[in-house]
Amino acid sequence: MLLIILLIFIAVFLVILAIYLNIAAVKDSPKAELKRRLRQVALTGGRDAGSMTTDLRSEIIRETPPLVRALSKVPLLRGLEGRIDRSGLTISVQTFLLITAGLGAIGFLVCYLLSKILILSLAVAALLLFVPFLFMEFKKRQREDKFTELFPDALTMIARSIRSGHSFASSIELVGKEVSDPVGSLFKTAYDQQMLGLRINDTLNNLNNRIDSLDLRFFTTAVAINSEVGGNFAEILDKLAETIRERLKIKRQLRVYTAQARMSGYILAVLPIIMFFVMNVLIPGYQKTLLENDTGRILLIVAAVMQIIGFFVIRKIINIRI
């Protein structure tokens, strides 16, 4: 009976989620994207908010759904839309929060139906609430790593295009067409903004808000300096591309040197969990006292928390920034 109730709950939740995602996909258009970015500037008071008139900002805020306005007033969620954008995910804040709440609710329900332990169910739900944020952070780092891999080729392409006589704006357009995402899409956005009247330096500076990349900041700084004092810009870009490639080479070598430490961290994190279930299977009832006693359950929760902290400490030690 409990299994049937659980399956019905999951099925209803997935149907509602599918309907919501379909509605969100229909709204995923250039017009909706423009409104979303204007709403983000108006609500968060970003760096471009100063150029927005008071009447326009008031009108945008009036047209914003009440839920979005309420979420923008919460300090912890105020920058969530920007973090989602930097991770490359194409979902709204409402969808992200819905997925987060759904994971927590399903985890709590499943754990409580199986174990009947309220504290353990709450702990599982709390852990599952962090899963979407960890996934978003993973996608953000993955996107930044891919950008760093492709960026030297984009700089070389711009340098060669400038040497062949093309303008800097045309070189940016070429990168937007020829280079894979995320570099291509970001530079295409910069070129499109330039075609709408913004200065090319400003459009490139705006890219720093969409991806966290030190190399991109070096590039935009070089563009700003070159526009003021001039110089051999193609040579500067070649040197910058060479520097990035050398740094990537050193980074790959460090990953090889720290491979054993990373594997040790994964084994130390997973081994206690595997041994817990193995002992449960080989010796049924051996851990019954630990699971049914309040002190034992608290010890299990403390051990799980310390295990997670230890895993992140190991990750921090071997994460050498270049």
Image (cartoon, rainbow, N blue to C red):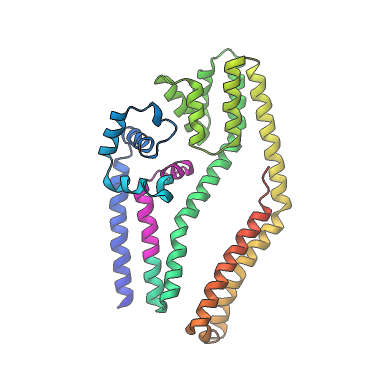
Q: Observer-nearest residue: 42 or 286?
A: 42
Q: Is 169 on the left or on the right of 57, as rendered?
A: right
Q: Is 144 on the left or on the right of 78, as rendered?
A: right
In magenta segment, residue 5: no
On screen, residue 67 above or below 30: below
Question: At which x and y percent is residue 177?
Answer: 48, 27
Q: Observer-nearest residue: 88 or 321?
A: 321
User: What residue appears at the point 46 percent right and 42 percent down from the top-left corner?
Assistant: 88
Q: Observer-nearest residue: 95 or 74?
A: 74
Question: At which x and y percent is residue 60?
Answer: 29, 35
Residue range corresponding to the magenta coloring:
81-105
On screen, residue 312 above or below 52: below
User: What residue appears at the point 60 percent right and 20 percent down from the top-left corner?
Assistant: 225
Q: Is 65 on the left or on the right of 307, as rendered?
A: left
User: Looking at the image, how many numbered discs can be counted on the residues?
Assistant: 0
Q: Residue furthest top?
A: 165
Question: At which x and y percent is residue 96?
Answer: 38, 51
In magenta segment, residue 103: yes
- Is residue 193 visible from the viewing direction of this image? yes
User: What residue appears at the point 46 percent right and 24 percent down from the top-left corner?
Assistant: 191
- Is residue 177 visible from the viewing direction of this image? no
Majority SS type along the magenta span = helix
Q: For the N terminus, which image quadrant? A: bottom left
Q: Quadrant of residue 16?
A: bottom left
On screen, residue 302 above or below 295: above
Q: For the C terminus, which image quadrant? A: top right
User: What residue appears at the point 29 percent right and 68 percent down from the top-left corner?
Assistant: 8
Question: At which x and y percent is residue 82?
Answer: 44, 42
